[in-house]
Image (tube, grey):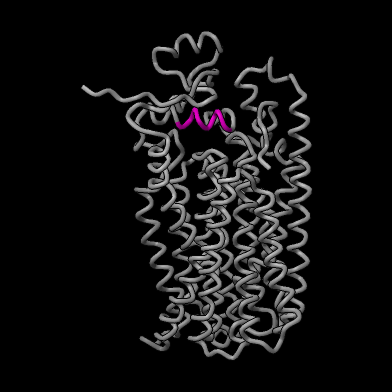
Amino acid sequence: MATTQPQAPLPGPVVPHDEEKAAHHHRTGSSSSSLGITPTAPGPVVCPPHTTPRKLTTKIDIHLVPFVIILYLMAFLDRVNIANARAFGLESDLGLSGTQFNTALTIFFVPYILFEIPSNILLKKISPRIWLSGCCIGFGFITMMQGLVQNYAGILATRFLLGLFECGMFPGCFYLLGMWYRRDEAQKRFSLFFSSTSLAGAFGGLLASGLGSMDYMRGYRGWRWIFLIEGAATVVIGAIFLFTFPGFVEEAKWLRDDERDYIKARLHADQGHSAAERSITLKDVGKVMSDYKVWLGGFMYFGIIVPAYSYAYFSPTIVQSYGYDKIQTQLHSVPPWAVAFVFAMVIATASDWLKHRFLFTVVPICISISGFAILLNVHDNLRVQYAALMLICMGMYSAMPIQVCWFNMNLGGHHRRAVGSAWQIGFGNIGGIIATYSFVGGDFRKGYIICVSFICLSALSCIVYAVAIMAENKKKATQTLAEGMTEQEKAELGDLNPDFKYML
């Protein structure tokens, strides 16, 4: 009978098998956790003989990536479809004037910013399947309610509740993805997930052009149909996800025990022990927030959020200013998003291949800056202006996932990654408040200048962060503290432990 050739071992620790566990417990003095996780000891990481690393990674992709993509696509679509609704008469029907529309956009970010860290803590405690699916049902229902509001107070209330239910989507999905993949293979998955925003922008424009044509059907304006139908679809998807959405490695019933051990061991070899067995405390939050690198991660995302949300919320208004009617405006908003999706995946693939992040966030930022420079100086050439919108969109929406993946995957351990990822997204989304007032009264030039200023802040923060982690790596290379530390002590330190090397 033919035998299966053993897989070549990978360098790093391995989770002990049953016959080795007793001796391992005796050596380490540790006990099994409630999740069955044991601090690991040095040794080879061997793939189970019935599969290969590539096949196992593909299995993870199939069971994880489509779910987070669909979830965030629906979240982003429900968040920004108000921009499409505006083109179909939302403001006039609700009697909005002055900056009331901008205030309705702003109020979304109040709960969205405040509750991101608590949301990730609850996600860790309750499980991604229940928490994220429940939030999905919630923000889908609120989106439907937006289609029924009659006045300014109604749109304010629904936008606030939408921010409350959506606050866990983005950091929660990034946190979940980060607990499944090694750093050198994570960027493509992060960018594919993040690019669901581009798909939502493209799909939202096409969908809005169709739903807008239902104007006055059954007595409802077209903008109401946009909210009602898109919200109802989100509720249905959330209900399905309650039974199908994936969780952490330790919870995956579709993995064999030896596959689960191998995945945890390869992650340990790349990032150290995750300490998934213990809860996140307020003391953990304080320790994470005392790290200056965590603040830099927040500022680089904060800087790019301003132009990103400005584009998402006001690109239909900008396109409409080029003289297109309502339907043509929605259709012309699609190509920049589509180009952004393709470019983001090319950038992500190259970044993973070269195992490098810094240049792949700074170069796309420069592309966006060039687009804004064109719009600031060209006012009489429609094709050039439209091409500039494409440069802006493709640059921003390819740099953002690189930034988030770079920062998240440089955080070691469940507790540091849960808090750090939520902080970056939460603090960064303060920029969303600024974005909602960047294009007030049709003053596009002022809006472009605001966007360029903040995207330059993002680039500067990326540069400072790169210098910081290079300095930390150099410092760790001269340390010998790791030799006397236990695996549990290293797990508590996360990426601060001497063996953890930051990826540039």
Q: Between residues 11 and 337, which one lies in front from this camera angle?
A: 11
What secondary structure do most residues of the magenta stretch adopt?
A: helix
Counting every numbered tag in the picture gives 0
Q: Which of 191 and 74 is in front in this view?
A: 191
Which x, y percent locates residue 496?
70, 31
Q: Where residue 166 sits: x, y (%)?
A: 54, 58
Quarter in which the C terminus is drawn: top right
Front in this rendered view, residue 359 or 147? 359
Q: In this view, does 307 lie to the left or right of 233?
A: right
- Residue at the spot 60% in from the left edge and 59% down from the top edge: 398
Residue furthest left as drawn? 1
Q: In this rendering, is residue 172 above or below 196?
A: above
Position of residue 355 relative to residue 456, above or below, is above
Specify whether residue 466 is painted magenta. no
Quick check: 351 above or below 14?
A: below
Task: Please tell me which residue is depicted at 57% across the width and 40% down the height of the picture.
Answer: 183
Residue 197 visible, this angle: yes
Rendered residue at 70%/38% (across/down): 288
Of residues 41 and 347, the one drawn nearer to the viewer in this rendering = 347
Q: Can residue 33 be seen in this view?
A: no
Q: In this view, does 88 lie above or below 103?
A: below
The picture places residue 62, in percent across and down from the top left corner, at 38, 47
User: Horizontal placement of 7 versus 81: left or right?
Assistant: left
Q: Is residue 269 magenta?
A: yes
Would you say 151 lies left or right of 497 here?
Answer: left
Q: Where is residue 238 in the image (x, y as percent from the top left)?
A: 40, 57
Q: Quadrant of the N terminus?
A: top left
Over which residues does the magenta segment extend?
263-270
Please give the name of the residue rendered at 54% of the width and 77% of the height, measured from the top-left corner: 333
